[in-house]
Amino acid sequence: MLFNVERATEYMRDCGLDALVATSPVNITYFTGYFIWIDGLMKEYMVSPGGSADIAQGYALFPADGEPALAVTGSMLAVNGVDLRVRDLRVSGDSGLDWSLAPRSLSGRMNRVYALVKDAPGYGTTTEALAGALSDRGLASGTLGVEADGMTAGRYAQLRRTLPDARLLDCSNLIRLLRMVKTGDEIDRLVQAAEISETAAMSAMEQARPGDNVQDVIRRFRAELGGRGADLDHFAFGVHGLGIATEPDFILGETDVEYVDWGCRYRSVYSDTGTTYAMRPLSGDMQGRFEVLRASMDAGLAAIRPGVLSSTVQAAMQDVVDDAGMAMYPHGHGVGMEVRDYPILAPDNGLRIADDCVDVPSDLVIEENMVLNVEAPLCLAGVGSLHLEQSVVVTDSGSRPLVEQQRERPVFPLGAST
């Protein structure tokens, strides 16, 4: 299970919440496991010409006491919830199904979906469905943490009108803080995503030769991911040290040395990593800079342990490159159900991570079972670029690699002289 029940329960107790309500597609998946590709894509005007650009509104309910619930738009999509641990699935709107023939014998779980869609209460909206779930749990007048960032202002106002006796508190940042510390299931998925991504990228890059278009490398990477059950998130590359790109045609020259950064999406989690891709051994100038990047990475990894501030890790990395007189910004971030989760390993900016439920410094304390990426990029304008990025799981006394990643030297095409 992705959802960190113990951590959520602790936050709710500390904040005096009777329930948490997720409203964005990613956090509905986090709370319940429910995912349908179209939820973040289908906008109102696409089915109702002249309508708004709002996406369909769903809700996931996690009460302090009692069973969780899920409210989704469109009964025809309810079958996507057939394998969920959440048993209370509520749907709104007309099913769009033809009921003129008697059903054949269905398995238990499919029969449950049939009964749900056929006999569901006639909720006009998912907001009404959520209100029904809350009422059934005696929470219609409770204190509810609601992910306001996943709703438009109009829908939030509608929720307030539908629940006039409830106390609604924005918990958008609470949920971000909740998701920082991973469950065993999420770590396992992140390991699988990283393993798939690493194998696919190395294979794609090692097959390339000078004169190849980097877009062919990306196509090979995409195909390798697909064969392993993952989807492309990104494959970014440096272009003569002039910046980072994903779209241009770029022909790999015999002396090119460039930044590469890649990732995939696998079972609702992301991988994100990178290295230096070189067509031949580095020059003395580039090798010296690569060694500084490696030393910076090592300093950052050594600084990671529970109780340390996020800025401390970045400072350890920055000290190495500053001492070498290099103009670069090593940093890091969490990774999980989004390509960047909290914490962000960056200098303390003095801001607060705050909503109606939490208020903490943005310079977050590192905790056990966070999954962090530490990265060191360097773009040398008109020359080339270098990069290193590694992923670790925070342990009780330090960190361990999420997966094995060769980052002691650049990646070269197979057969290149190293």
Image (cartoon, rainbow, N blue to C red):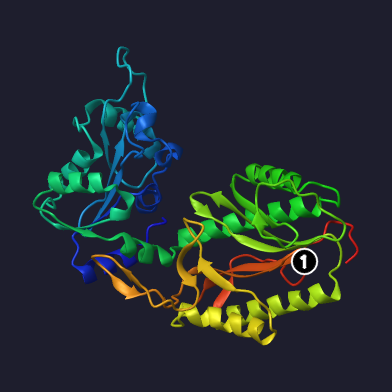
Q: Amino acid at mark 1?
A: Pro
Image-based side of 177 in relation to 395, left or right: left
The residue identified by callout 1 is 410
**Relative to 342, does residue 107 appear above or below in the rendering?**
above
Query: Who is closer to the viewer here, 240 or 18?
Result: 240
Query: Who is closer to the viewer here, 324 or 387?
Result: 324
Query: Who is closer to the viewer here, 282 or 222?
Result: 282
Q: Residues within 10 Å of mark 1 (few under 14, many from 20)?
A: many
At a point 39% along the width and 29% down the height, the residue shown is 46
Image-based side of 27 in relation to 403, left or right: left
**Relative to 257, does residue 395 appear above or below in the rendering?**
below
At a point 86% along the width and 61% down the height, the residue shown is 255
Query: Who is closer to the viewer here, 86 or 224?
Result: 224
At a point 86% along the width and 52% down the height, the residue shown is 210
**Relative to 135, does residue 97 appear above or below in the rendering?**
above
* Spot occupied by residue 319 in the image (x, y as percentages of width and height): 61, 85
* Spot occupied by residue 78 in the image (x, y as percentages of width and height): 34, 34
At mark 1, the secondary structure is: loop
At a point 13% along the width and 45% down the height, the residue shown is 161
Tell me which corner region of the image, top left, top right, bottom left or bottom right, holds residue 74.
top left
Image-based side of 224 in relation to 58, left or right: right
Which quadrant: the C terminus?
A: bottom right
Q: Residue furthest top?
A: 100
* Spot occupied by residue 381 in the image (x, y as percentages of width and height): 72, 65
Q: Is any part of residue 134 visible from this angle? A: yes
* Spot occupied by residue 48 in the image (x, y as percentages of width and height): 33, 27
Q: Residue furthest front?
A: 382
Which quadrant: the N terminus?
A: bottom left
Tell me which corner region of the image, top left, top right, bottom left or bottom right, holds residue 223.
top right
Q: Residue furthest bottom?
A: 323
